[in-house]
Image (cartoon, rainbow, N blue to C red):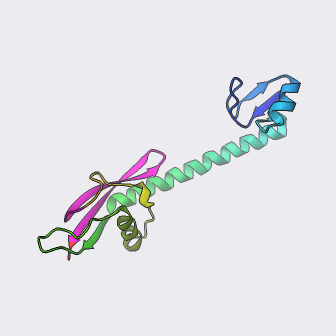
């Protein structure tokens, strides 16, 4: 019998492959445990349609990430912090502050976990380049301008 593998099966194949197996193994183990479906024309059409839909969704997501990357490259996030008597910042600028300011002033939503700061903390006044990992191996550069009050 022919089966369409839904999940990877060690020693048989990867998800999405069509394999010829013995009837008992196919019906009792693969289909019974949810590792495969019988490779009927209807099941194959549904699988191909699902694969096309996933590919289109991925293409759409990549286009949105590239657009966000271009928008982040044009933006400079200005964060104002209080200065001490010696001109140093009280505390440091965190990833969360950068994400909040980016959303508040530029209406761009970025997860704070995706922001990567080279020195772990931004503790001095100045302009810094910060990496933002957007996903799917796409990263953007963001300028952060820390100003004292």
Occupied quadrant, residue 108: bottom left
- Residue 48 % position (x, y): 72, 40
Q: Which is nearer the eye, 58 or 103? A: 103
Whole-percent x and y of residue 116?
35, 53
The outermost residue toward the left is: 86
Q: For the C terminus, give its image quadrant.
A: bottom left
Using the image as rendered, state which of residue 87 and residue 103 is in the foreground.
87
* Residue at 29% from the left image edge and 51% from the top image edge: 118
As for residue 145 lying within the magenta part, the answer is yes
x and y percentages locating residue 44 in the rendered image = 78, 37
Is 73 left or right of 22, judged from the image as shown? left
Residue drawn at (84%, 36%), measured in percent from left and top?
32
Placement of 59 over or under 25, stated as above or below: below
Residue 93 percent coordinates (x, y): 29, 65
| Left or right of 38 in this view: 5 | left
Camera sees residue 38:
no
Residue 36: within the magenta?
Answer: no
**The magenta segment:** 123-147
Image quarter hosting the N terminus? top right
Q: Residue at x 26, y 52 (%)?
A: 119
Q: Is residue 38 above or below residue 81?
A: above
Which SS does the magenta portion mostly show? strand
| Residue at 67% from the left image edge and 48% from the top image edge | 53
Q: Nearer the viewer, residue 76 or 85?
A: 85
From the viewer's perspective, is 102 left or right of 57? left
Q: Nearer the viewer, residue 20 or 22?
A: 22
Asked whether the viewer can see residue 50, the reply is yes
Mark count: 0
């Amino acid at each position: 019998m022919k089966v369409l593998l839904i999940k990877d099966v060690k020693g048989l194949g990867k998800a999405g492959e069509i394999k010829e197996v013995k009837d008992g193994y196919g019906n009792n183990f693969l289909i019974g445990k949810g590792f495969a479906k019988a490779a009927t024309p209807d099941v194959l059409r549904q699988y191909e349609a699902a694969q096309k839909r996933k590919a289109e969704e991925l293409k759409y997501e990549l286009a949105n990430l590239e657009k966000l990357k271009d928008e982040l490259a044009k933006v400079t996030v200005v964060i104002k912090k209080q200065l001490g008597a010696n001109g140093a910042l009280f505390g440091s600028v965190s990833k969360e502050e950068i994400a909040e300011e980016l959303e508040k002033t530029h209406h761009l939503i970025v997860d704070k976990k995706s922001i990567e700061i080279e020195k772990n903390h931004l503790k001095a006044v100045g302009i810094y380049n910060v990496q933002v990992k957007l996903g799917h191996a796409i990263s953007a550069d963001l300028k952060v301008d820390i100003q004292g009050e």
